[in-house]
Image: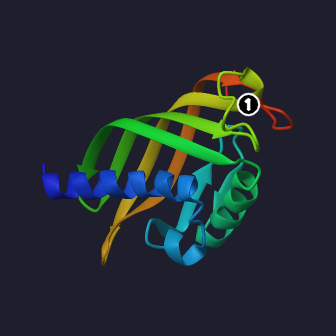
Amino acid sequence: MNWEHVVEIQQVVNGYFRALDEKDLDAAHLRRILTDDAKVIRPNGAAMIGPDTIGQSHRESMARFESTQHIISSHDVAIDGDTATVRANLVAIHIWPGARTMLTAPESYFAAGGVITARLRRVDDGWRIASVENAVKWRAGDFKNMAQTGR
């Protein structure tokens, strides 16, 4: 296994979730992480395709939170030529506006844990995410006006 590629793939996947937390979701930035035809599948099955659509959807979704933290771990990377798959664990914490000092109250946040499955493709200047989806395994906190998604 080429460990340089494994590390680069892990960095690309981590970079996607970092972009969510830092709200760095403009299409130009996402094009350094995603392929032009990338597909993000939300836990409810809705799909977004392409950096422009993905970025706009994430900007709208993330705007409702004071802050988020996506903690991703245990990247299991498999490489086959110019394609790769990643299976990783995710804990996503979302803080509602004004709630940063009341995090022990369930109405202040919602959290979810799941398994990320991503497919990546090697392009001229490195690896890019071609698809990513999250299979939610558990949830906690207050979902307010958000539809609960996944299983």
Q: Position of residue 79 (x, y in %)?
A: 25, 50
The amino acid pointed to by label 1 is: Ser
| Residue at disc 1, secondary structure | helix
Q: Give the number of callouts.
A: 1
Determine which residue is flagged by label 1: 108
Q: Is residue 145 left or right of residue 133?
A: right
Q: Nearer the viewer, residue 89 or 23?
A: 23
Residue 113, percent from left and from top:
55, 28
Q: Nearer the viewer, residue 140 or 85?
A: 140
- Nearest the viewer among 130 and 104 is 104
* Crowding at mark 1 (Cα within 10 Å: few <14, some 14-19, many 20+): many
The answer to whether 99 is drawn above or below residue 47 in the figure is: above
Q: Residue furthest front?
A: 101
Position of 7 with respect to 70 (left or right) is left
Q: Residue lying furthest right in this view?
A: 145
The quarter of the picture where the C terminus appears is top right
Identify the residue shown where x is 23% and y is 59%: 81
Task: Give left or right: position of 70 versus 63.
Answer: left
Q: Residue at the spot x=59%, y=53% of the render?
A: 40
Q: Taking 78 as reference, is 18 above or below it?
A: below
Residue at (58, 57) in percent of width and height: 39
Residue 90 higher or lower than 7, as above or below: above
Task: Give the x, y percent position of residue 105.
Answer: 72, 22
Measuring from the top left, give residue 72's x and y in whole percent: 42, 39
Q: Nearer the viewer, residue 141 or 112?
A: 141
